[in-house]
């Protein structure tokens, strides 16, 4: 199992917690300006990548082989997929406003997921977004949107990446917890 985290000079804390939680790999995602690949003494396999906005993606692809783009309400997901082609997109479910009568406004549709499959772009489920929603109703709406996106991704054979994407070690969760949440979403 692998977890994706966004450290801020607290890499060793993330490594210690990841070892205790039972992860095999840990991927440190840095903003493009702070990107560096350091060596750490650990039994975990450590990977490095860049997390950025759509504006910074083209520059980030020159620095790292693994680029994660966080979708923003102003960003056009189709443009991100077709022109920028990052390795992973997270936060797509927060892009649009309210839900429709018969389906969720989840940020993805079958056309976008087919394009993601064509360009081999993964869909990232950001577990810290679920944890940081203040109200339970907001969490329920977010989980419903994530469920719809996972269903669309599975139909189009898009890789789904689940990670905490957290900045704080206290937001990390055990790999079995994320599997349980995902199995409940699938049903």
Image: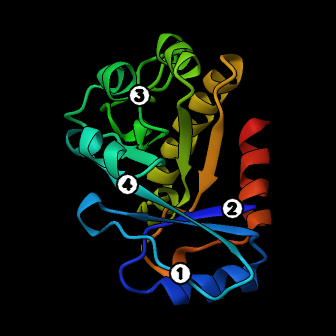
Q: Is residue 85 left or right of residue 53?
A: right
Mark seen at residue 39: 1
Sequence order check: which comes first, mark 3 or mark 1?
1
Q: Is residue 184 above or below residue 27?
A: above
* Residue, disc 2: 2
Mark seen at residue 168: none
Q: Are marks 3 and 4 in contact (CB under 8 Å)?
A: no
Tag nearer the camera, 3 or 1: 1
Q: How many marks?
A: 4
Q: Secondary structure at mark 4?
A: strand
The image quadrant of residue 176 is: bottom right
Mark 3 Cα shell of 10 Å, populated few (<14), some (14-19), many (≥20): many
Mark seen at residue 51: 4
How far is disc 2 from disc 4 in space, using C-alphas? 16 Å
Sequence order check: which comes first, mark 2 or mark 4?
2
Q: Are marks 1 and 4 in contact (CB under 8 Å)?
A: no
Sequence order check: which comes first, mark 3 or mark 4?
4
**Residue 60 shows in the view:** yes
Mark 1 Cα shell of 10 Å, populated few (<14), some (14-19), many (≥20): few
Q: Is residue 15 left or right of residue 104?
A: right
Tag nearer the camera, 1 or 4: 1
Q: Is residue 75 above or below residue 9?
A: above
Q: Are marks 3 and 1 in contact (CB under 8 Å)?
A: no
How far is disc 3 from disc 2 in space, using C-alphas? 25 Å
Q: Nearer the viewer, residue 79 or 94?
A: 79
> Which residue is rendered at x = 34% and y = 30% of the image?
98
Mark 4 Cα shell of 10 Å, populated few (<14), some (14-19), many (≥20): many
Q: Are marks 3 and 2 in contact (CB under 8 Å)?
A: no
Mark seen at residue 107: 3
| Residue 156 placement (x, y as % from top left) | 65, 17
């Amino acid at each position: 199992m692998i977890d994706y985290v966004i450290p801020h000079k607290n890499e060793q804390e993330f490594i210690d917690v990841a070892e205790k939680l039972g992860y095999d790999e840990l991927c440190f995602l840095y903003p493009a300006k702070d990107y560096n690949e350091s060596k750490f003494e650990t039994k975990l396999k450590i990977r490095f990548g860049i997390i950025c906005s759509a504006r910074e993606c083209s520059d980030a692809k020159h620095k790292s082989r693994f680029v994660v783009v966080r979708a923003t309400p102003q960003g056009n997901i189709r443009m991100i997929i077709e022109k920028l082609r990052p390795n992973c997109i997270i936060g797509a479910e927060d892009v649009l406003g309210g839900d429709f009568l018969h389906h969720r406004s989840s940020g993805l549709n079958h056309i976008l997921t087919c394009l993601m499959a064509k360009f081999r772009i993964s869909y990232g489920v950001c577990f810290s977004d679920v944890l940081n929603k203040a109200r339970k109703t907001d969490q329920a709406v977010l989980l419903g949107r994530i469920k719809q996106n996972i269903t669309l991704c599975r139909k189009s054979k898009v890789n789904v990446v689940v990670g905490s994407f957290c900045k704080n070690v206290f937001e990390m969760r055990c790999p079995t917890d994320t599997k349980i949440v995902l199995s409940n979403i699938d049903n």
